[in-house]
Image (cartoon, helix red, strand yellow):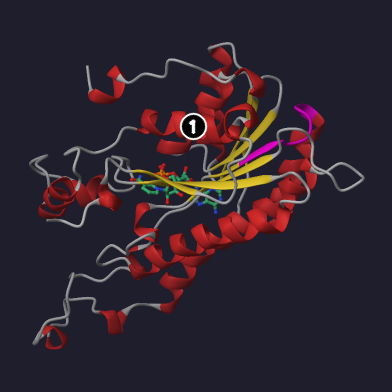
Amino acid sequence: MSAAQQNALPFLPADLAGQVAVVTGAGGVLCSELAGALARAGMKVALLDLDPAAAEAVAARLREAGCEAMGIGADVLQRDSLEHAAAQIAATLGPCTLLLNGAGGNHPKGTTSKEWLEPGDLADASLTSFFDLDPAGISFVFNLNFLGTLLPTQVFARQMLLPDGRARAGASIINVSSMNAFCPLTKIPAYSAAKAAVSNFTQWLAVHFCKTGIRVNAIAPGFFLTAQNHKLLFDEATGDPTARAGKILAHTPMGRFGEATELAGTTLWLASPAASGFVNGVVIPVDGGFAAYAGV
Ligand code: NAD
């Protein structure tokens, strides 16, 4: 049994039952798990993903387990697509009270080959240096992570508000930032800056919405093993940790990667007004101590 399984959640907040959660990127590794945790807490969950089959596969598993869930194809960068999904959700499950902005990720064209620029590197055409970074790659990453958080918020926060402009009881937004928003990781300037923007936006929106009653917080996952980063962390041929994975583990005081289930407790705590009703505008690291460790 892994350390994460030993820490299986001993509680589910009771006040979430019957409320409607919308989770973007819900076909992916981390957010499928978080959607499941919200569903097990009794929420009616709409799982949105660019890949409708991935979203529906997760929803089907949740329905088999007795939960209420629907999978929907939606692009977090297309307002029309989000509006279409929002109308379907409102008609089927009811208005959204919790939005979990989980869709996000990096792009190779926003990534340098090496950690440092060293003398001689510019003569090596095989390297992608800082000077070679493609604006299209940078825009992709900024759009997916930042605009892909802002646009769903515009669409689904509307459903949280009653006609008098006050929020439904329990209305809340949880963004997914990253530990690299606190201190940028080498090689991925676009992703680090885009997640810093998500953290900053979390604070801005918490202040902007506070008179309505909508709370806005974020989780900042450390290193979790997913399809997205598997190639970066393990040698495909041998299955051994790469040099980068070794550095990550050496910089993680707890000495291991996180498991998706270990984000569930923080998510449920932030979602539940009974548990965290006075928590607003925070970004919670869930990273085995990575962000706290200076390295010596
Ligand atoms: P993942 O790639 O498994 O899941 C991301 C999902 O988002 C995919 O199912 C993808 O289809 C979907 N998606 C992509 N573009 C979309 C779009 N335009 N519209 C709708 N859906 C879209 O990634 P993951 O590792 O589960 O990451 C989930 C979130 O956690 C992301 O925001 C990621 O940046 C963040 N994060 C992950 C880690 C980690 O270690 N995996 C660490 C920190 C933060």
Which residue is labeled 1 in the image?
34
Q: Main secondary structure of the magenta part?
A: loop
How packed mark 1 is, by other alpha carbons closer than 10 Å (few <14, some 14-19, many 20 or more), is many
Residue 212 % position (x, y): 78, 48
Q: Residue at x 51, y 25 (%)?
A: 36
Residue 293 appearing in the image: yes
Q: Number of numbered discs present? A: 1
**Which quadrant of the figure has residue 39?**
top right
Q: Residue at x 10, y 44 (%)?
A: 237
Residue 79 % position (x, y): 70, 57
Residue sitting at the far front:
278
Quadrant containing the N terminus in the rendered view? top left
Residue 26 % position (x, y): 52, 37
Magenta-span inclusion, residue 241: no
152 versus 146 height, above or below = above
Residue sitting at the far right:
164
Quadrant containing the C terminus in the rendered view? bottom left
**Which quadrant of the figure has residue 110?**
bottom left
**Which quadrant of the figure has residue 88?**
top right
- Magenta extent: 92-99
150 versus 122 height, above or below = above
Residue 111 % position (x, y): 30, 68
**Camera-nearest residue between 100 and 134:** 100
Magenta-span inclusion, residue 98: yes
Residue 78 appearing in the image: no
Report helix, strand or loop for mark 1: helix
Residue type for callout 1: Leu
139 versus 152 height, above or below = below
Q: Residue at x 32, y 40 (%)?
A: 226
Q: Residue at x 33, y 78 (%)?
A: 133
Tell whether 247 sits left or right of 3.
left
**Camera-nearest residue between 63 and 173:** 173
